[in-house]
Image (spheres, helix red, strand yellow):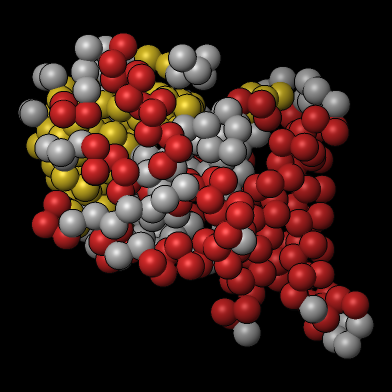
Amino acid sequence: MNRNNKNYQYGITMVDAEYAQEGIASIYLLEQDGQVAIIETGTTHSVPYVEEVLQSKGLSFDDVAYVIPTHVHLDHAGGAGEFMHRCKNAKLIIHPFGAAHMIDPSKLIAGTIAVYGEKLFKKFYGEIRPINAARVIEAPGFFKLDFNGRELQFFDTPGHARHHFCVYDKQSKSIFTGDTFGIGYPQLTTQQGRLIFAATTPVQFDPGSLLQSIDCLMSLKPETMYLTHFGAITPSDDIVKQLKRSVRKFANIALDAQDVFNKNSGSIYSNSESRVDYIQQKLKDYLLDTIEEMGAIEPREFYEKNINFDTKLNAQGLDFWLSKST
């Protein structure tokens, strides 16, 4: 069993989705009176890892009552169709803006292939199964679910994506945050704790909405945030400030890049790919400098390797945000 899997209090278990590699994406299992809710699904490749954990608890896919991706990006919902195929008694709970993509994932697949290419798509995500509409429950803002007497509340949290909700578990006073509360890999730990930064990946980044969504989550006074990327953290004032600062800084980096490329129209800086590269380098510089300020434990090259993938995706999202605003 993966060493990253963890049992928390209140019947909460984290399963490493092993998305691309270990320690990148979490799946959470909630156990309540012999039934299970799966929050986040990883990809189709993640399904056997969840099955292994269920079996270790004397449970099976027949005991799964709900499958709950926070939004339809495929590192969060790519395995939903396969889970629903295996979990015959389960209902899918999804944001109203994402439901159509779970029922007919063809546009989702096409968009992801456009970013990664078909070879990498298959490697990362495998087959994406459609889900019967009759088994889909749409959860708008303030939707409440009675899970065997355990109340789960769903909050609409746009900013990373318009089809994003977060799930508040009243019993544990915790929130399953998807990408709304940012990225905080354990491997990015410093002397002052983990580096936390915003997820601005394509294609619906909205900095104002994201800051409001963070405030919405903090108004619930949560004791724990269960990040998809990656694991549980305590949402201290310092972490919230760090996250919000990254949202503003990322937006400003993008706007500065827009000015640079507008001034250099017709030069090497005038094409979109170069603008993405420019933004990525600025994101890297900011994050690596922040790590140094927080007290780096590992060499700079170690941290750079571990932020490279996310800064590339974030840069693409910021570049798309610029293209929408012009």
Snapshot quadrant of residue 119 = bottom right
Snapshot quadrant of residue 287 = top right
Say left or right for 64 vs 207.
left
Q: Quadrant of the C terminus?
A: bottom right
- Furthest toward the bottom, the residue is 266
**Of 283 and 119, the residue lying toward us:** 119
Counting from the top left corner in percent of width and height, residue 229 is at 52, 37
Counting from the top left corner in percent of width and height, residue 274 is at 81, 70
Say left or right for 160 vs 312.
left
Q: Tell me what residue is drawn at x 85 percent, y 86 percent.
A: 265
Q: Is residue 149 above or below residue 89?
A: above
Say left or right for 290 vs 200.
right
- Furthest toward the right, the residue is 267
Snapshot quadrant of residue 136 = bottom left
Q: Is residue 180 above or below residue 324?
A: above
Counting from the top left corner in percent of width and height, residue 307 is at 71, 41
Query: How many marks overall?
Result: 0
**Of 228 and 59, the residue lying toward us:** 59
Any part of residue 24 in sight: yes
Q: Tell me what residue is drawn at x 68 percent, y 29 percent.
A: 188
**Of 6 and 219, the residue lying toward us:** 6
Counting from the top left corner in percent of width and height, residue 112 is at 52, 61
Say left or right for 183 vs 5.
right
Q: Tell me what residue is drawn at x 16 percent, y 60 percent.
A: 133
Any part of residue 159 in sight: no
**Of 274 and 197, the residue lying toward us:** 274
Q: Tell me what residue is drawn at x 83 percent, y 81 percent.
A: 270
